[in-house]
Amino acid sequence: MKVLIIGSGAREHAIAWRVDQSPKLTKLWVAAGNAGTAAIAENLEIRSGDIDGLVAAAQKTQADLVIVGPEAPLAAGLADKLDALGIPVFGPSEAAARIEASKSFALELMRRANVPCPDFASVWDQAGAESYIKDHPGPLVVKADGLAAGKGVLLCQDSNEALSAVKLCISDKAFGEAGDTVVLEEYLSGPEVSVFAFCDGKDMSPLVAACDYKRLEDGNQGPNTGGMGSYNQPDFWNDALAAKIEKSIMRPVIDKMAEEGHPYKGVLYAGLMLTQEGPKVLEFNCRLGDPETQVVMPMLESDPLDLMLACARGNLQPETVKWNNKNFVGVAMVSGGYPDEYRTGYGISGLDHDGPEETLVFHAGTKLGPSGETLTAGGRVLTVVGGGETMEEARRRAYSRVEQISFTDARWRRDIGSAANHGTARLAG
Ligand code: AMP
Ligand code: GLY
């Protein structure tokens, strides 16, 4: 199979790494990729926003499967365009991608499907917000409805904060058009977990769970980032919880979307909070998570191309999808200054080491320099993954690999996957 992967982060490098192991693969392209994908695939210089360019590349390469990493091209209809040309695509249609691209769509869908989620209201102006807040004075979460690159979520302690947050979205347009509609949500608490299902429109794979860390500093301090690390299979995860989430959340959503005429194909990613009343959905995403993918791809025992092609074609056999039971911990190495201003272009050393066993290095913001050397080229530079029979072993391996790698001003958290913070890593303050 000839395969084209869309995206350029460590998520896409992890997908490419796993796809590269398939005996079915004959040729792999990544658009746009990074220095890591360049070692196993041919990179194509096409931005994720260039939908026509991506479609043309899929045609030119005669790809048998296109795997879409990020949400933006899905929300812009890339899968529909490929589908119209008969090119199998792993990722949902524009209509199905609304589950991520519009928070009010997702919440209203959940309401119709009886899926547990926070109490909420969608509003378009200050008056609408005031009337909801009057009856719900407690802590609230104010969210820009559309895609805001993970930034449009404002946690508000009281009514005044909530009203200011609404103003920031609607009047000040802090998140552009994404904030023209605003969602007000009940404030929930509990451990958080990301749950992934590979779907073919009707059926889904067994679920797989991971947690990510949003804050820059140890102990969940400092600003929010695109993700500082992840680990799979948190200690509270078990078959009973997976079955409950499948039955009360994933299954009803897949069924409702099929029933309403936009079947869901691709990865359905549920961001859940395990509340006192049971798991509730904070958000859905229409793709794999980053940095969760970096600890999920190493769990996949089945052939990745069989799996993704079956999802694309609508003939998934869930019982054929196998995950291993190992622990993986992924540590993001980032540029000093990230998530604000940072410098790039520094040489990265230590990548050639074999490293301790069961370690993987996935590239994000890297590029090849003029003599083939690897340079930093972004805020999140690498995700270094360790695997083991226990979380501690996985963690130890990941960090000993991190210690071998260096670049100017490299930063990373020291507490990724440590037992003390399971499930609490995302708790925002
Ligand atoms: P989201 O992008 O919707 O997942 O929100 C980002 C983060 O904000 C989540 O990971 C949670 O930590 C927090 N959050 C979102 N919605 C809620 C909620 N209803 N109650 C409490 N925290 C929330
Ligand atoms: N890990 C969070 C995300 O991918 O959106």
Image: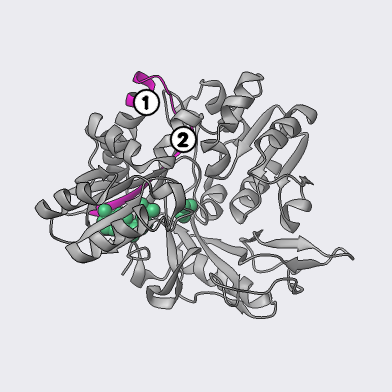
Residue 197, position as x, y percentages in the image: 43, 38
Secondary structure of the residue carrying tag 2 is helix
Residue 376, position as x, y percentages in the image: 71, 68
Residue drawn at 56 percent across, 45 percent down: 70
Residue 353 in magenta?
Answer: no
- Nearest the camera: 388 or 409? 409
Residue drawn at 64 percent across, 44 percent down: 48
Residue 146 visible in the snapshot: yes
Q: Report the amino acid beneath label 2.
A: Ala
- Nearest the camera: 246 or 180? 180
Which residue, given by chain and number where applicable, does mark 1 sit on? Answer: 257
Relative to 146, is 64 on the left or the right? Answer: right
- Nearest the camera: 55 or 240? 55
Measure the alpha-carbon separation of dots 2 and 1. 11 Å
In the rendered view, tell whether residue 250 sits above or below residue 316: below
Frontmost of labels 2 and 1 is: 2
Residue drawn at 75 percent across, 58 percent down: 35
Relative to 212, is 161 on the left or the right? Answer: left
Q: Magenta residues, as a range? A: 256-274
Which residue, given by chain and number where applicable, does mark 2 sit on? Answer: 97
Relative to 247, is 270 on the left or the right? Answer: right
In the rendered view, tell whether residue 86 sits above or below residue 75: above
Does mark 2 have its CB less than 8 Å from ligand 2? no
Secondary structure of the residue carrying tag 1 is helix
Is the residue under label 1 in contact with that under label 2 (CB below 8 Å)? no
**Precedes in sequence: disc 2 or disc 1:** 2
Pick out the residue farthest to the right: 371
Relative to 238, is 12 on the left or the right? Answer: right
